[in-house]
Image (spheres, rainbow, N blue to C red):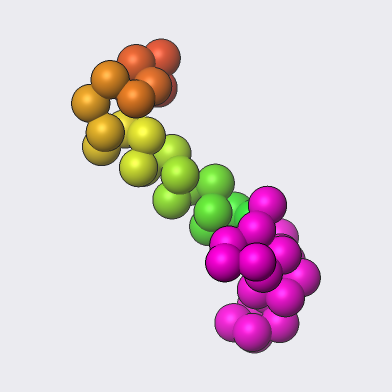
Amino acid sequence: MSFRGAGVAEAAQTLGIPPGTVKSRAYYALRALRRALPGYAADLR
């Protein structure tokens, strides 16, 4: 996973949080986004 070229480790260091927290936040953010976009992922509703 990367965002704007930053990997999990770099994002964690920049944010001052553990890498697991970066992964968890990314997972839940993507899940919320999928639910908010109609027709994107019907199986997640």
Q: Where's residue 6, x and y in %?
A: 67, 69
In this rendering, the answer to whether 31 lies above or below 13 is above
Location of residue 17 (image quadrant): bottom right
In this rendering, the answer to whether 9 lies above or below 23 is below
Q: Where's residue 34, x and y in %?
A: 37, 34
Q: Is residue 10 left or right of residue 45?
A: right
Location of residue 36 (image quadrant): top left
In this rendering, the answer to whether 35 lies above or below 7 is above
Single out the residue that lies furthest toward the front: 5
Single out the residue that lies furthest toward the right: 9
Residue at the (71%, 64%) spot, across then down: 8
Q: Nearer the viewer, residue 10 or 21?
A: 10
Q: Is residue 12 magenta?
A: yes
Q: Is residue 9 magenta?
A: yes
Number of marks in the rendered image:
0
Q: Where's residue 40, x and y in %?
A: 34, 25
Does the rendering let one see residue 21?
Answer: no
In this rendering, the answer to whether 34 lies above or below 21 is above
Residue at the (65%, 58%) spot, across then down: 2
Does the rendering let one see residue 27?
Answer: yes
Q: Quadrant of the C terminus?
A: top left
Q: Where's residue 4, x and y in %?
A: 57, 67
Q: Nearer the viewer, residue 16 or 8?
A: 8
Residue at the (35%, 42%) spot, across then down: 33
In the image, which residues are magenta?
A: 1-22
